[in-house]
Amino acid sequence: MKDTLKGASAISLPVAPTSNFIRNIIEEDNRINKWGGRVETRFPPEPNGYLHIGHAKSICLNFGLAHDYKGVCHLRFDDTNPEKETQAYVDSILDSVRWLGFDWEEHLHYSSDYFAKLYEFAEYLINQGKAYVDSLTTEEIRKLRGTLTKVGCNSPYRERPVAENLDLFRRMKLGEFADGAHVLRAKISMVSPNINLRDPVIYRIRGVHHHRTGNKWCIYPMYDYTHCISDALENITHSICTLEFEDHRPLYDWLLTQLKTMVPCHPQQIEFARLKLTYTVMSKRIMSELVEGRFVEGWDDPRMPTLAGLRRRGYTPESIRLFAERIGVSKADSWIDMGVLEDCLREDLNVRAQRRIVVLKPLKLIIDNYPDGGEEECFAPNHPQKPEWGKRVVPLSKILYIERDDFMEIPAKGYFRLAPGAEVRLRYAYIVKCVKVVKNASDEIEEIHCTYDPDTKSGTTGAKTRKVKGNIHWLSSKHALKGEVRLYDRLFTQSHPDVSERDYKALLNTHSKEIISAYIESSLNEAQPEENGYFVPDRVDTKPGRPVFNRVVTLKDSWGKIHNP
RNA sequence: UGGGGAGUCGCCAAGUGGUAAGGCACUGGGUUUUGAUCCCAGCAUUCGUAGGUUCGAUCCCUACCUCCCCAGCCA
């Protein structure tokens, strides 16, 4: 079911993908043999930030489609804005895509690889009378562009002769002008109702160092110009992007039409709705403010929706791929409930994680009739549904820690765990009965006393003779280890955080991280659950002899839902 | 109010002229030494609204309503 494929795209879901409009397009293309059955996609991040779960949707889509249709998916860095891009971001993106389980094989590309070609094509456009050098300032260009409801006006430089344009453009490349002195614009129409077609800027002067091309260039192509050509040069068949690029498509198509004799193909741009997840934000700007303002402890803070954060929290690549499949792909704006993501994780961890005991909020339980200093071994299965995974020893002694929530002095209706006079099974051990509650001066329960029935040990014939409904976990006080456990909750208190509000930070959940000192089984080391959630060692803060765990997600809790909704 | 998109169950999402898939959530029931998992059952006479075409419309036509995106020398 969950095999680990190596190669092209290491994906494999427990469910068959449902149809979506992009698959329908591909299937129709294949039917009419538009691309000779070829499917070539690409994931084109700009190396100016960290990848997040929204990018994961796109990665899974692009690599997934390539995988399913026996095609290939390129990883292409759209690195045309050197002021914001760095090699460090390239590295982190590479790392995240690899971690998610995808392999671009030899198809790792950079838009900057095409700078020479892009430049050559720009000269071609100039020669064709389809591009011109404009010498207006940014503000002047903006003014002449018109507005949403008013058409634009031609720049006074729009009719510059080809030779002058060529000369100017070459000198721009040579570095003869200051940043901003000139731009190259496509000559389309200043009266188009689509603002993207009002002679868009396609090259600007930026005398800055580029993380890959160094100081070779001082003019850099713009996204709209670069992207379609890069797609075409790479022989992409289906160029999948998000909805906001929908009205850039006419420009994408215009450029490739002008350049049809220069490029090998004309890919189809297809737009889908970007992911929005409740209780969090996907905006790079907001995330960056959260990091800078120390509201979280970095881009890989386990509360962040970044892939680095999710990974550190304990999310598995499989769970994220399952999530991407489960949410589907469409063009409708939508918010996916965070619960869907969490459930995908539970589904994955449930089958793969070994079980261990963690007592989060301990309450001392003393077995009065158990011999002082005595101890014995109990055997607990590593997975309740997988006997082949074997059992491990859990030592029992007279003094234990149980979960505070597993005892109620005055039991609520329907509660069937420990209470005065009540009987419950210490899981994998004996049935005990609560005989006494000891409180401190402030009336807080300090310890509870029980008696055990020596004939009821789990695994013995006596265990079958008596049935109790309640069943609680425990750890022997002298054997349990102490460990730091970090409990996380949603980043925002609002399901649909409106970060356009100036004071959106007031919407942050101030209880999104709780650090506690818990009792753990000595062998707890992977994502391992028992009762109160799935835990994973924190990959940054765990040091030898100092265990630090993150609770990735709680278990479903239908009692908790009834009792404290 | 220019242009481009979208509106199918609480949340996603198939279907697109023949009478509403699936998942999540939810509700019942069963199994269970995790109130977990697992299993079984239930859960839109209805597809933004109003008209029209048709034997028949979520699907075609018309009008309207609501929401999203676009005026970076960002991507």
Image (cartoon, coloured by chain):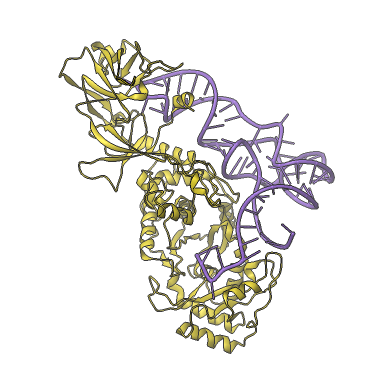
Report which quarter residue B37 is drawn in.
Answer: top left
The colour assigned to chain A within the rendered structure: yellow
Q: Identify which residue, A68 or A242, lies in the foreground.
A: A242
- Which residue, as the protein is rendered here, is positioned at the far left? A373
Letter of the chain shown purple in the rendering: B
Report which quarter residue A391 is drawn in.
Answer: top left
Question: In this rendering, is residue A364 above or below A518?
Answer: above
Residue A189: x, y in percent?
67, 74
Q: Identify which residue, A119 or A449, lies in the foreground.
A: A449
Looking at the image, how many numbered discs can be counted on the residues?
Answer: 0
Instruction: Give me the residue at 48% from left, 43% from top.
Output: A492
Instruction: Give me the residue at 55% from left, 78% from top.
Output: A183
Residue A294: x, y in percent?
39, 51
Residue A137: x, y in percent?
57, 77
Asked if residue A227 lies left or right of residue A199, the reply is left
Question: In this rendering, is residue A323 above or below A183?
Answer: above
